[in-house]
Image (tube, helix red, strand yellow):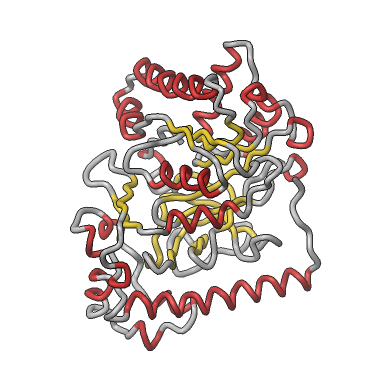
Amino acid sequence: MKPEVVSDSEMQSRTKAAKDQLDKHAYEIIQHHFHDSTGCPFWLGKKKELKFDPLKEVKCYADIQKFPLFEDEWLRGGPASRWVPKAYAGKPTYIFETGGTTGIPKSRVVIEDHWIDYENFSETLPDKYFPKGANWLMLGPSGPRRLRLAVEHLAQHRGGICFCIDLDPRWVVKLIKKGWMEHLEAYKEHCIDQALTILSAGHDVKCAFATPKLLQALCEALEKKGQTFKDTGITGIFSGGTEFTPQWTRFCIEEYFGGPTEQSGIYMTPTYGNTVMGLACSKPVTADDGYKISYYAPQPRAVAEVVDFDDPLKVVPYGDSGRVKLTTLTKELFIPGFLERDEGEREKPYAQYPWDGVSGVKPWRGIAAQTTVGVY
């Protein structure tokens, strides 16, 4: 699929409309989270420590800069109920975790955000390759992960059934850190065996989520059986992870799929997401653009900025590298200025997503040497 192309004037119009929508949304979200009748205990308590009144002084997205950067540790430990807004009191609540390979994991309470995020994402998927009513394979982490339930909801939202595997990413990271590569291979084979069993059972799976490493392992396992990925019948793949590089994408498309979408009939869309932000889509990845992958956050519900490595309040020029800073703006969760463990290059707005994007995502250089990527 080719990226949409619009005139400069149309692009300016779309960019302005997106900015106006974000400013209006930011104001409404702040009013919600800092009003005594609807806010959560955490932010209502923090309001007393702030040097400004959010209800009176935040009138647009730029005013979010008045908040101090969000501290990673605020998401570790309990009680988790301090994050539940009063507006959602008594509603069934999920808890999703991230990290946790050492110490207490970060956690996020969720009521319906994962449903909303993935229903919005569903609108970006081409029905030709992700047929409505088709069944899905979830080849990714299970356990207390947002991803598992979110992909399952995506399948159900589109009218299908989701088939999942058991996968503990924390165990994968421990195996890597211990250097137990033989055990790592055995565990990977265990996960792929589960996927092959599902695919051989006549469930008519047409769509899949898979991390790049697991997708590659699945393709290699199929080759050993004298089959190709096309033999699975899967035509639509949504994938995500820091291993998603242009080099890997080119190899996957050309060697495993048998060529670009128009030739192979297989469509793959990279995504970038996490438990805090949700899901950032990519513009179509093409050979003409060197398989470059550019992600765009799901504005206005979340904003991704590429900021100076030394000054997180300063956005870098287009094309320059910086650290990824996320701001989450949903009625369930407000997270201002969360400095991610990733870096990338700032990208210009795109026709379908007329706001800033980020490309070349990789572990932030400040921790890259200590980062264990695991199944991603």
Image quarter of residue 111: bottom left
Q: Quadrant of residue 142?
A: top left
The number of numbered badges drawn on the structure is 0
Residue under the image location 66 percent in, 51 percent down? 283
Query: Height in image: 248 above or below 61?
Result: above
Say which of 137 and 34 sits in front.
137
Q: Position of residue 106 (x, y in %)?
A: 29, 51
> Residue drawn 61% across and 72% down?
18
- Quadrant where the N terminus sits is top right
Residue beneath the point at 35% across and 57% down: 110
Say if residue 345 shows up in the picture: no
Provide residue 164's location: percent of width, then percent of height. Answer: 44, 33
Q: Position of residue 366 (x, y in %)?
A: 40, 48
Residue at 32% from the left image edge and 25% from the top image edge: 175
Q: Residue furthest bottom?
A: 56
> Foreground residue, 189 or 375?
189
Q: Nearer the viewer, residue 133 or 256?
A: 133
User: In the rendered image of this protein, does residue 144 appear above or below residue 346?
Assistant: above
Q: Is residue 107 left or right of residue 315?
A: left
Residue 29 placed where, x, y %? 42, 75
